[in-house]
Image: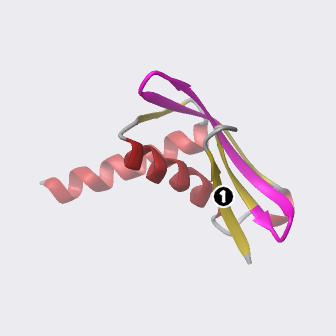
Amino acid sequence: MIEIVFDQDARQASAYDSTKQVGYCVFTEDHNTWNITHTIVVESYQGHGLARKLVECILQEAKRQGKTVIASCSYAKKVLDEKTNVSLDFEV
């Protein structure tokens, strides 16, 4: 079973299979804004939605802390764009 862990001090969310780190998503922090800069999943673990879960972990924690999130990571930007479009669809 894969466990997703948020680490504020390291500024990342990590995916673990037992004790082995199989993915991570890192962000920088500038005042009240988190910028997701990089998302990596070990090749043998790709295709199972881990990258999305890592990005969403950071998004959930940012929301809990009242932070704004941007993404210079292309994958995280795609996830953010999808979430923005879904939110707009529900508001209309």
Q: In the picture shown, does residue 90 fall above or below 28?
A: below
Q: Residue furthest top?
A: 30
Of residue 83 and residue 6, the one placed in the foreground of this image is: 6
Above-or-below relation of 4 to 28: below
Which color mode does the image show? secondary structure
- Describe the element under mark 1 as helix, strand or loop: strand
- Provide the major secondary structure of the magenta segment: strand
Please give left or right for residue 48 compared with residue 70 in the image.
right
Residue at (15% x, 54% y) in the render: 91
Front residue of this view, candidates 7 and 12: 7
- Looking at the rendering, the stretch of residues picked out in magenta corresponds to 16-37
Residue found at the very far front of the displayed protein:
9
User: Total number of numbered labels?
Assistant: 1
- The x, y position of residue 68, in whole percent, is 39, 34
The magenta stretch spans residue 19 = yes
In the current view of this chain or complex, which residue is farthest to the bottom?
1
- Could you classify mark 1 by the number of other residues whose Cα lies within 10 Å: few (under 14), some (14-19), or many (20 or more)? some
The quarter of the picture where residue 65 lies is top left
Question: In which quadrant of the rendered view does residue 86 lie?
Answer: bottom left
Residue visible at 22% across and 56% down? Answer: 89
**Which image quadrant: the C terminus?**
bottom left
Spot occupied by residue 16 in the image (x, y as percentages of width and height):
77, 63
Q: Quadrant of the N terminus?
A: bottom right
**Pointer 1: what residue?**
5
Q: Is residue 31 magenta?
A: yes
Kind of residue at disc 1 = Val
Please tell me which residue lies in front, 20 or 52. Answer: 20
Position of residue 57 measured from the top left corner of the image (x, y, whole percent): 54, 55
Q: Residue at x 51, y 55 (%)?
A: 56
